[in-house]
Amino acid sequence: MQIQIFATGGTFDKEYNELDGSLFFKETHLPEVLQLGRCALDVQIKTLMLMDSLDMRPVDKFTLVDSCKCSTFDKIVITHGTDTMVDSAKLIAKELLGSSKTIVLTGAMIPFKFGPSDALFNLGSALSFVQLLKPGIYISMNGELFDYDNCRKDKELGKLVRIRD
Amino acid sequence: MQIQIFATGGTFDKEYNELDGSLFFKETHLPEVLQLGRCALDVQIKTLMLMDSLDMRPVDKFTLVDSCKCSTFDKIVITHGTDTMVDSAKLIAKELLGSSKTIVLTGAMIPFKFGPSDALFNLGSALSFVQLLKPGIYISMNGELFDYDNCRKDKELGKLVRIRD
Amino acid sequence: MQIQIFATGGTFDKEYNELDGSLFFKETHLPEVLQLGRCALDVQIKTLMLMDSLDMRPVDKFTLVDSCKCSTFDKIVITHGTDTMVDSAKLIAKELLGSSKTIVLTGAMIPFKFGPSDALFNLGSALSFVQLLKPGIYISMNGELFDYDNCRKDKELGKLVRIRD
Amino acid sequence: MQIQIFATGGTFDKEYNELDGSLFFKETHLPEVLQLGRCALDVQIKTLMLMDSLDMRPVDKFTLVDSCKCSTFDKIVITHGTDTMVDSAKLIAKELLGSSKTIVLTGAMIPFKFGPSDALFNLGSALSFVQLLKPGIYISMNGELFDYDNCRKDKELGKLVRIRD
């Protein structure tokens, strides 16, 4: 089973710029994360964009939805900033719900490059969910699985929460 | 959904003993791994034993099988040394196949305490598989899911491989 | 020999705020850094402030100089942001040059909490220099020792450089 | 000022062999450690051997002493297992005391590859001491500086201690 991973940036791929002390994106760390996890799956990584999800414009959202639509893979994992992850999931659902594709969005609360990060855990989790789930649009964070239309980011808790049980 | 995690040791929990330069077990690092992954699941950790799986005697294997049998949880993840992980899975299957329990064994190739470890990835993966799989005995390593009777450890590659496709 | 360490913040102590994705200060990581280095020296840590050195106002600089002056220790290490580290060293020198005190300022290019950081190396270095140097004001970064009046930060290289050999 | 670093192995360079679960040596991690510390010094690394210091035979000790003697550098840092570090320092002193060379032996209690290691701190420390010390043979561990003939390894504490104050 082949899995497509789309990188869009988000906290997952943020780095520390030692020249000016800011956070920035240089490249996706997905290959490094997969190697660390000794991932034995047949995955193909494609970087669609590298940005904070709050900075994504309509054209970026369109690129993401369109990439899902045009992908020849039926199993897709997307790394995405958590702030607008749910919105992107809904946009994707609008176009792809009912298709043969299983799409799981995931992210991280702490950048992978910052030592004690949840990125490795979340990617292991998302890659596992995507293998077993029937077609649909899902979000996976910190071990939990959400339907795309049944979660929201709680900004105060800093985590995704279920809307209803 | 509640998940029981049984710790048995294995590479996952090995540490470096700085007094004599050997590898040893002090305690399970599962709470630390779950915290790092910001795991939001309702899990209960129980340490059954802490040993290299090559050192497990029949009585230890019995303890493991019996703990699965007596557990009141229907979802169980077991951290286990990879060397005899498949044997243990078969022993568990002999007693529990056909029950209502979903049991996933996992482990690590590099100890969690040794920085660049696959433990976090594997635990994220196992905790996700166990949520979706129907009752049965499974092994999950490095993103891959195996039926308990369809894998073996390839000692030269240092990884689990499928017996037949 | 007792050594006083003054924490002022800087990149050394920056952390990632997972609620809003910004960098911030919560507390100094000096105790953790010393424990990691298994530091066997008799050191006393005091947090004077926790800020980016570009944000230090005259009153903060005064606090730093005054703390050096009032300290009962003759060996002082200061962790400091690299951007205005040289300026602070000069202010300290103006008041304390000629005193019995040996003062070494150091910092980090990557925050200690961000895994692959130079903080541990720099602190080991500064704590060693301060033990052997005769009274004076010095800066130590990345293994190099500078006189307070013979270095500047090269913003393009992102490192301290010697003014003249 | 140029500094020669001789690698001999020891805990500093130990790695985890995931094929058989043992500890072994593959190569020195000194280049990686120096890069992590963003070390700006002019150092030259030479691997003399890679072994547990308890496994060093007379011929290995001879190689070490001879390499110090033949080195064209006046500043030498040696990474060495802590178990026989003091013995090696004494052998070196027998041949080189009175020469123009400053030699500092250092090591680690936890392997560099095992995440939370003291290797980075110790190397930063040794490279700083060697720059300032007058010719002689010294040992530096965990921030402390010892004369070669005034320390011993306390096996129970797992650290170097001073013989007399």
Image (cartoon, coloured by chain):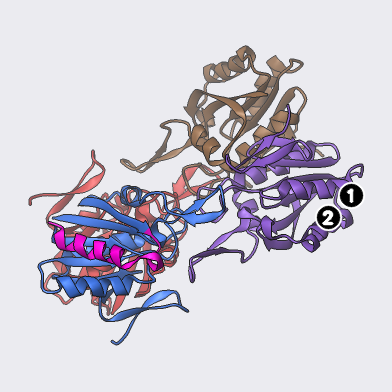
Chain colours: A red, B blue, C brown, D purple
Vertical arrangement, residue A93 with respect to residue C96, above or below: below
Q: Which chain letter goes with mark 2? A: D
Q: At 36% across and 51% down in the image, what residue appears?
A: B29
Depth check: D52 or B145 in front? D52
Residue linked to disc 2: D65
Amino acid residing under circle 1: Glu
Label 2 crowd bin: few (<14), some (14–19), many (20+), radius 10 Å: many
- Tell me the CA gap for discs 2 and 1: 7 Å
Residue B105 is drawn in which quadrant?
Answer: bottom left
Q: Secondary structure at mark 2?
A: helix
Task: Report the residue at 69% width, 52% height from top.
Answer: D80
Q: Chain of mark 1?
A: D
Where residue C152 appears, x then y in whole percent? 68, 36
Q: Tell me the quadrant of the picture where the C terminus of chain D can be found.
A: top right
- Which amino acid lies under the numbered mark 2 shown in the image of this protein? Val
Residue A90's place in the image compared with B91, above or below, is above
Q: Residue at left 89%, top 49%?
A: D95
- The residue sitting at the top extreme is C70
Check if mark 2 and mark 1 are on a common chain. Answer: yes
Decide which of A21, B84 is in the foreground and name it.
B84
Picture quadrant of residue D7: bottom right
Mark 1 = which residue?
Answer: D95
- Tell me the quarter of the picture where residue A31 sits: bottom left
Secondary structure of the residue carrying tag 1 is helix
Residue A62 seen in render: no
Up the image or down, D39 lies above or below D144; here it is below
Range of magenta residues: B51-72
Q: Identify the mark at residue B109; answer none if there is no mark.
A: none
Specify whether residue C73 is painted magenta: no
Q: Position of residue A139 (x, y in %)?
A: 21, 59
Closer to us: C83 or C135: C135
